[in-house]
Amino acid sequence: SEENKKIGSQILNLAEYVSFLINDIIIYSNESEIKILTSNESVDFENIVIFCYDVANSLSNMYSGSDNRVIKYYFDDNVKNYLVESDTARIKQVMLNLISNACKFTKKGIITISCFLNDENEINLEVKDT
């Protein structure tokens, strides 16, 4: 059914989020050998924003007051014209941390995930809450 597909999708999103958290714990658990593993790949910012939006909706349902919280996203299509090499996993990790905090502390209001070019033609990723 459609409801089962939605629940399955939320479970997959949260599982990926948990995997990021576990990876952080493993990296930082041994203080004598802190190593941050990074990779360099083409970043698909639109994919990151949509993924973060999906996870935000899943997280929002876990916290109280989810009926009073709205999740939105905005993606500037001009960003697609930029080729950026970076660590997609780390970008997602930072965004998900911000989103998790926004979901925890925004009991009523709007959480917006945005990716856009600023006035200096730099790519901005942003999580705003009210």
Image (cartoon, rainbow, N blue to C red):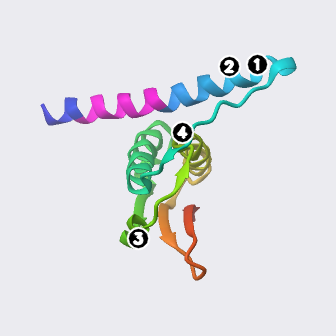
Task: Say what amino acid the circle numbered 2 marks.
Answer: Ile
Kindly identify which numbered label has been placed on residue 26.
Answer: 2
Q: CA distance from mark 4 to mark 2?
A: 15 Å
Task: Say what amino acid the circle numbered 3 marks.
Answer: Asp
1 or 3: tag closer to the N-terminus: 1
Pick the front one: 58 or 109: 58
Note whether 30 is above or below 102 in the view shown. Answer: above
Note whether 120 is above or below 85 in the view shown. Answer: below
Residue 43 is situated, as x and y percent measured from the top left of the image, at 47, 51
Pick the front one: 29 or 67: 29
Q: Quadrant of residue 1?
A: top left
- 93 sits left or right of 72 in the view: right
Q: Secondary structure at mark 2?
A: helix
Pick the front one: 86 or 69: 86
4 or 3: tag closer to the N-terminus: 3
| Residue hosting label 4 | 89
The reply to whether the C-beta atoms of the residues labelled 3 and 2 are less than 8 Å apart is no
State the extent of the magenta-drawn residues as a range. 6-16
Which residue is at 38% across, 45% downward?
54
4 or 2: tag closer to the N-terminus: 2
- 23 sits left or right of 116 in the view: right
Which secondary structure type mostly characterizes the magenta part of the structure?
Answer: helix
| Residue hosting label 1 | 29
Which residue is at 37% across, 28% downward?
11
Task: Say what amino acid the circle numbered 1 marks.
Answer: Ser
Q: Secondary structure at mark 4?
A: helix
Q: Residue furthest right?
A: 32
4 or 1: tag closer to the N-terminus: 1
The magenta stretch spans residue 11: yes
Task: Say what amino acid the circle numbered 4 marks.
Answer: Ala
